[in-house]
Image (cartoon, rainbow, N blue to C red):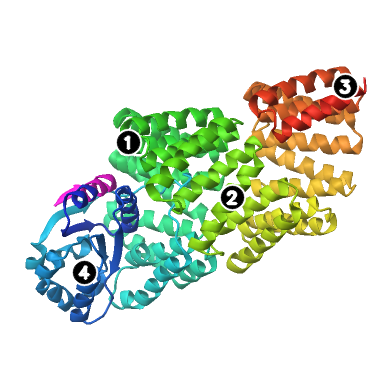
């Protein structure tokens, strides 16, 4: 039995599949690990050779002969693919004497081995002994035996790609959970295993498909699991002590459950306990310690503690680079995690350096068309676009789209994500017509493949609506946004953040149509709900505050607009600092509100502060710096200082032509302002 990490197991299985047309492989896995993650990685690896992987789940509590015959029939019709066979642990009661299903399968072993399909049988470690002793003849037919020993880190969460699950697939997983739940409890299967093997995959799939309420129904059905976990941990703690590996493993599972249930504070507390224990027991550089450190950092980042997350991620990266080397996959993942945190802190230059290094290493080791390389390329492109280098982002995203369309096909979810990302870069370049064409293709494909209510379809609908609004087609943009909002309310509820963002988008379009009163009502509703659900300091709450302030300004309520902008700036300065990009944007917004009130001197002072900070932190030709330059010039003109306004507008126009191009909307707007000001001389 060969032990192995996730990566080595996936590599061995991929190699085995490439070398054999048939045969049986057995993977023993610890119940602490979700085999679904391994299967997903294997699917991705096999997709490069266009080898399909199909999944078969042995039914619980069914007649053994029927189970065996059905499996042989399904495998025989799968046509040269790779089959993943799960459910062995449920096919025979763990505490019972019946081995009927396995015995019948053992009688079919020669037929199973002769089928033209490569079979991967997943057997949890807790059932391996029963399997080997119960059917030694069947076990002898397995040509490959692997043992997955790695305790997995949490998913990185920041990549542009993720597993996309259709509504039908998600509900199929949920039905499997409901069908097996009572049978598993009747067999005294530990609640921890029920969560890892049944509930968690179903919850994650439902959420991926946008079925939040159905996911919550599962969480509600197992709400007592938290108490069972805690009791079991206390029992083991009293017998073995708090540093026992099994206690730590259960504590990690409980932390994951708390996080899935929305208790990030409780999850953070437990993860800190595990990290302290593993540091003491294994040392600060042990792989398990680093995994615990990474898990805690991701939870801290989700809570908004960017500084705490950054400190831990810098330690993880330093150790991984020194111990494992810069090209090790774990090192590159740590590099990516830190880059995302730096970007969230406003340090886009630091994030870019790390992403460029990660892309260089992945290209050198894996090649340009490896999925991990293409993901790294997409991540870097998003940072370039945020920095204003939309041309550089476009070049990278065009390479990603071409590779994915050729390898995965035009309608693969990752291909459509690449197309969507490229449309965003084109939009930033000012090429709204081409962005719209791509977004329409993405929407049509996602609606056809995933269905109209899928989150990715609704995102595509929202993106297209934004482009239509920018082109002045408010009527069609409004129609799409109303459809998005209706779907979000139905699937997620009125107070879900995604629903509130959809409501805010619709309000912005209504404002563009001149329906200020209705936009005002919706924006007040969004701000109230965002404040209640996410808190006043959450970025989405502050964005909602800014949007309402802009509507108030257009309605002539300059005092109300100024008050909201001042609140947003105060919170931003306190939470992320006075030089964070979001703070400087809030500063510009307040300055515009002061200008509308007639306080030209106050507006000028704030614009000058924003321009000085952006020039020092970002550089003179950064898009946000040029925006500050343009805004200050207009205020200077309003205050009568036309000569300095002309100088700044000329400088801004030259910068925008260089960075954005001659035909970008911002470049054209600055050129128009400069022309009018010169005519007034």
Relative horizontal placement of residue 466, taking residue 369 as reference (left or right):
right
Q: Quadrant of the C terminus?
A: top right
Mark 2 and mark 1 residues within 8 Å of each other at the beta carbon: no
Q: Name the residue under label 4.
A: 76
Q: Is the magenta stretch mostly helix, strand or loop?
A: helix
Relative horizontal placement of residue 381, taking residue 241 as reference (left or right):
right
For this orientation, the residue located farthest to the bottom is 63
Mark 1 and mark 4 residues within 8 Å of each other at the beta carbon: no
Q: Which of marks 3 and 4 is nearer the N terminus?
A: 4
Mark 2 and mark 3 residues within 8 Å of each other at the beta carbon: no
Q: Is mark 1 on a helix, strand or loop?
A: helix
Mark 1 or mark 3, which is nearer to you? 3
Image spot of residue 626 (x, y percent): 71, 27
At x 39% / y 67%, what residue is drawn? 228
Task: Specify few, some or many for label 2: CA neighbours under 10 Å numbering under 14, 14-19, or 20 or more.
Answer: many
Image spot of residue 277 (x, y percent): 35, 45
Q: Name the residue under label 3.
A: 678
Q: Which of marks 1 and 3 is nearer the N terminus?
A: 1
Magenta region, residue range: 1-13
Q: Distance between the residues labelled 2 and 3?
A: 39 Å
Q: Name the residue under label 1.
A: 366
Disc assigned to residue 657: none
Q: Which of marks 4 and 2 is nearer the N terminus?
A: 4
Q: What element carries label 3?
A: helix
Frontmost residue, 533 versus 78: 78
Q: Mark 2 points at which residue?
A: 439
């Amino acid at each position: 039995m060969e032990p192995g990490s996730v990566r080595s197991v996936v590599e061995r299985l991929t190699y085995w599949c490439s070398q054999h047309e048939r045969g049986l492989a057995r993977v023993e896995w610890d119940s602490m690990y979700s085999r679904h993650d391994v299967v997903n990685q294997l699917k991705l690896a096999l997709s490069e050779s266009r080898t399909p992987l199909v999944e078969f789940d042995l039914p619980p509590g069914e007649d053994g002969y029927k189970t065996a015959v059905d499996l042989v029939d399904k495998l025989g019709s799968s046509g040269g693919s790779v089959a993943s066979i799960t459910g062995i642990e449920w096919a025979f009661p763990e505490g019972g004497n019946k081995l009927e299903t396995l015995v019948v399968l053992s009688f079919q072993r020669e037929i199973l081995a002769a089928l033209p399909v490569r079979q991967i049988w997943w057997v949890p470690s807790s059932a391996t002994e029963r399997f080997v002793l119960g059917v030694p003849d069947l076990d002898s037919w397995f040509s490959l035996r692997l043992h997955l020993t790695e305790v997995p880190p949490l998913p990185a969460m920041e990549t542009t790609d993720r597993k996309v699950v259709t509504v039908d697939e998600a509900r199929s997983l949920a039905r499997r959970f409901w069908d097996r739940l009572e049978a598993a409890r009747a067999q005294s299967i530990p609640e921890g295993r029920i969560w890892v093997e049944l509930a968690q995959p179903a919850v994650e799939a439902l959420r991926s498909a946008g079925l939040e309420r159905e996911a919550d129904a599962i969480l509600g059905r197992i709400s007592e699991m938290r108490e069972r976990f805690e009791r079991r941990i206390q029992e083991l703690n009293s017998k073995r002590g708090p540093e026992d590996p099994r206690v730590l493993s259960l504590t990690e599972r409980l932390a994951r459950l708390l996080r899935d249930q929305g208790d990030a504070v409780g999850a953070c507390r437990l993860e800190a306990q595990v990290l302290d224990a593993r540091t003491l027991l294994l040392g600060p550089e042990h792989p398990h310690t680093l995994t615990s450190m990474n898990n805690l950092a991701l939870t801290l980042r989700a809570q908004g503690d960017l500084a705490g997350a950054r400190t831990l991620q810098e330690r993880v990266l330093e150790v991984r680079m020194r111990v494992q080397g810069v090209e090790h996959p774990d090192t590159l993942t740590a590099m990516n995690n830190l880059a995302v945190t730096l970007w969230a802190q406003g340090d886009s230059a630091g994030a870019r350096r790390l992403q460029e290094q990660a892309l260089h290493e992945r290209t050198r080791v894996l090649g340009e068309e490896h999925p991990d390389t293409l993901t790294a390329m997409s991540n870097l492109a998003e940072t370039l676009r945020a920095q204003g280098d939309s041309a550089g982002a476009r070049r990278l995203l065009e390479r990603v789209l071409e590779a994915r369309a050729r390898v995965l096909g035009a309608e693969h979810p990752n291909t459509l994500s690449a197309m969507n990302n490229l449309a965003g870069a084109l939009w930033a370049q000012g090429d709204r017509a081409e962005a719209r064409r791509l977004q329409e293709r993405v929407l049509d494909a996602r609606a056809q493949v995933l269905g109209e209510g899928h989150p990715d379809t609704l995102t595509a609908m929202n993106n297209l609506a934004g482009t239509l609004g920018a082109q002045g087609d408010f009527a069609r943009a409004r129609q799409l946004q109303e459809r998005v909002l209706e779907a979000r309310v139905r699937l997620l509820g009125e107070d879900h953040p995604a629903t509130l963002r959809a409501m805010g988008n619709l309000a912005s379009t209504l404002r563009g149509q001149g329906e200020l009163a209705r936009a005002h009502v919706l924006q007040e509703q969004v701000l109230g709900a965002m404040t209640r659900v996410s808190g006043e300091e959450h970025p989405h709450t502050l964005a909602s505050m800014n949007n309402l302030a802009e509507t108030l300004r257009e309605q002539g309520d300059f005092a109300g607009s100024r008050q909201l902008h001042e609140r947003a700036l105060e919170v931003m300065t306190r939470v992320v600092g006075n030089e964070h990009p979001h703070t400087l944007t809030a500063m510009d917004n307040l300055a515009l509100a002061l200008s509308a009130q007639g306080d030209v001197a106050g507006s000028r002072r704030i614009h000058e502060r924003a321009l000085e900070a952006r020039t020092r932190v970002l550089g003179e030709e950064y898009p946000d710096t040029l925006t500050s330059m343009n805004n200050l010039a207009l205020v200077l003109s309003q205050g009568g200082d036309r000569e300095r306004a002309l100088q700044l507008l000329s400088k801004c126009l030259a910068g925008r032509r260089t960075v954005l191009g001659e035909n970008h909307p911002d470049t054209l707007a600055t050129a128009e302002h400069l022309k009018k000001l010169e005519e007034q001389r």
